[in-house]
Image (cartoon, grey):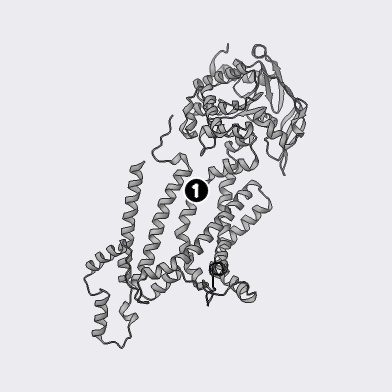
Amino acid sequence: MISIRSLSITYETSARSVPAVREVSLDIPAGKITAIVGESGGGKSSLVYGILRLLPPEASFSGSILYGRENIVSASDAWIRNFRWKKAALVTQGAMNSLTPVISVGSQIAEVLQVKMGLKRQEAMKRAGELLEMTGLPADYARRYPHELSGGQKQRAVIAMAMACSPDFLLADEPTSALDVITQAEVITTLAGMVRRRGMGLLLVTHDLPLAASICDTLAVMHRGRIVETGTPASILKSPSHSHTRELLSAYRVIGGQLQ
Amino acid sequence: MRGYWVRRAAGAVAVLLLVIAANFFLFRVMPGDVVSSIVDPRFSPEAKERMRELFGLDLPLHSQFFIYVRRMLTFDFGISFLSQRPVWDELRSRIPNTAALLGSALLLSSIIGTWLGVKAAQRRGGLIEKVALVSGSVSFSFPSFFVQLVLLLLFAYTFPLFPLRGSVSIPVPQGTLPQVLDYLWHLALPAGSLVLLGFGSWAIYVRNLMVKTLGEDFVLLARAKGLSEERVLWNHAFRSALPPVLTIFLLALPGIVSGAIITETVFSLHGVGKFLLDSILGHDYPAAGAAFYILALLTITSNLAADAAYSIADPRIRVGHRAER
C-alpha cells in the first residue's frame, strides 16, 4: 500500500510559487487499480512523479507519502533508487519519446534487469524477449530500435520494461493518450490484464474519464491540485457530486453520446 | 546499404579529381613563374629555357595535366622547386609532426570540452557551467596567433619553462626515452595553446546539445528506473547526443589543419602547415599542390568517416533500415 497523507507539492520559482498538489490524501492499495482523472494542469502528473521523487529541484513537498514504514518524501537517495522500478515502476507515454533512441528496446529492458536484479547480460536479453511477448510483441522485437516500432508497439515495450523487476506498483501517467482509440483500448486491456494476473497495484492517471472508469476499482477526481471526489466508478458515473466531475462527464456526453 | 556507400565513394573520387584539376590550373594562373623565382635573373634565356624543359613546363598544358593527374594518384609529387628534393620525402618528414600536434590538440580539447559540456548541462548555473561558457567565448573571440604569442612570451621567454622554437632540441638528446620526452616538451606549448583555444567551443556545443537531451522524456524514464545519475547521464543522455558530436569531431579534422599553418609558423615547427605556406610563397607548384592534395584527401576521408560514424552511433539514420508503422 502506498498511502499519501496531506501531500502538497509547490513549485518555487524566484518570481512566485505555484501550488500543483494541495493537501491530497489517497490510498493506493496493492492488487487494485486506482485511477485519478482530471483536466490537464490539475496536478495529476506532479502527484505520480512525486511518488517516485522525480520532480525538479524547485518542487517543495509537505505532508507524507508512506510505503510500508518509510516516508518517501524524506527517504535517503539510496533508498529511493532501490524503490524506483523494484517497488514502483513508471509507465509513461511510450508513443512519445520515452525510449532512448540509440539503444535497442531489448537492451533498455535488459539494462534494468542487469542493474537492479543482477542478471547476466545474456539472461537479461532472454528475459527481455519474454517480457515483450507478455505484452503481445514478438520476442525478436528486442533487437529493434524505438524508431522501428509503431506508437502502440512502443507503448507495449514501455509496459514490458515496467514489468521487468516485477514491482508491487505500476504508476501510469497518461499511458495511452498519444494513441488512437482502438490501440488505446488494446493497450489498456493488456495493462489491466497483466496487473490483475500478477496482483500488482496500478495507479492510472488520465484525463480520459470513460477509459479510467472502464478498468479501475477506485476512481479519484482531481481538480486544481485537490482530490474533490473519490468512489467506485459506478457510483461516480451515476451520481457525480462535484461540479468538475459533472463537467468531465458532460464533456464526454457531448462528444461521444450517452455513456453506459 | 551497399549501393549507398558505393555512390558515396564514387562521389568522393569525383571530388578528388576536381580538386586535382583546380590545383593544377590554380597554380598556373597565378602571377609569377617558378623559373623566375628559383634562378638568378642574370641567367641567359637559353639557361632559363633548359630549366623549363627540366621541369616539363615546355610541354603543352593538357599533357602537363595528364602527367599531373597520374602522379597525384600514385603519390609521386615530383621534385620541389625550392629544396630540389622529392616533395613526398619533404612531406613524409613533416606529416608525423603535424599529426602529433593536431591529433593531440584535437583529442585533448574534445575530451576536456565534452566532459565540461556534459557536466555543465548536468548542473545548470554551477561553477563548471560558468567555466564552460567563459572559455567558450574566449576561444571564439581571441585570434590564435595572439594567444600563442602571449604564451610564448610568458612561458618560453619570461619564465623559460618551454622551448622558444622547433620540434626537437639541437643537439638531439641520446636514447629513446630522452628523445620522446624532449619531443613532448617541444610539443607541449603549441599543442597546449590549441587545446586552450579549442576546448571552450567544444564545451559550449556539447552543453547545448546535452541541455536539450536532458529534458527529454527518456532521460526522466531512465531516472525513474533507479539507475545511477552517472549512468543516466552517460549511457542514456550522452549516448543519444553523441552522433552530432562525432560528426563535428571528424569534420573538424581538416579545419584545424589551417590552424596548423599559423601554429607551426609561430612556434617554428617542422610541419606540413609551415611547408604549405613556404611553398605558396615560393611558387613551388609541386610542393604546394601536394600539400593541398593531401589536405583534400584528408577532408574527403573525414567526410566519409563522419557519415559512417554517424550511422554507427545513430540507428535512426542507418541507411537501408526502414521504420515500420
- Drawn side of residue B50 relative to residue B85, left or right: left
> A19 or A112, which lies in front?
A112
User: Along the line of sight, which residue is nearer the eye, B162 or A149?
Assistant: B162
Asked where in the image residue A108 lies, by quadrant, the reply is top right
- Residue drawn at x 61%, y 19% is A195
Q: Residue furthest front?
A: B175
Does residue B67 sit above or below B305 in this rendering? below
Residue A43, horizontal then vertical, whole percent: 68, 29
Q: Nearer the viewer, residue B294 or B150?
A: B294
Q: Amino acid at mark 1?
A: Pro
Q: Position of residue A182 (x, y in %)?
A: 49, 20
Q: Which residue is mark 1?
A: B244
Q: Is residue A212 left or right of residue B65?
A: right
| Point 68% across, 39% down: residue | A56
Q: Quadrant of the N terminus of chain B?
A: top left
Is residue A19 in view?
A: no
- Mark 1 falls within which chain? B
The quarter of the rendered structure image containing the C terminus of chain B is top left
Q: Residue furthest bottom?
A: B42
Q: Is residue B18 left or right of residue B93?
A: left
- Residue A26 picture location, percent across and down: 73, 22
In terms of secondary structure, where does tag 1 sit?
helix
Give the image quarter of residue B34. Answer: bottom left
Dot 1 crowding, Cα within 10 Å, few <14, some 14–19, many 20+: some
Asked if residue B21 shows in the view, the reply is: yes
- How many numbered dots are placed on residues in this image? 1
Q: Position of residue A55 (x, y in %)?
A: 68, 36
- B236 w.r.t. A83: above or below: below
Q: Is residue B25 above or below residue A96?
A: below
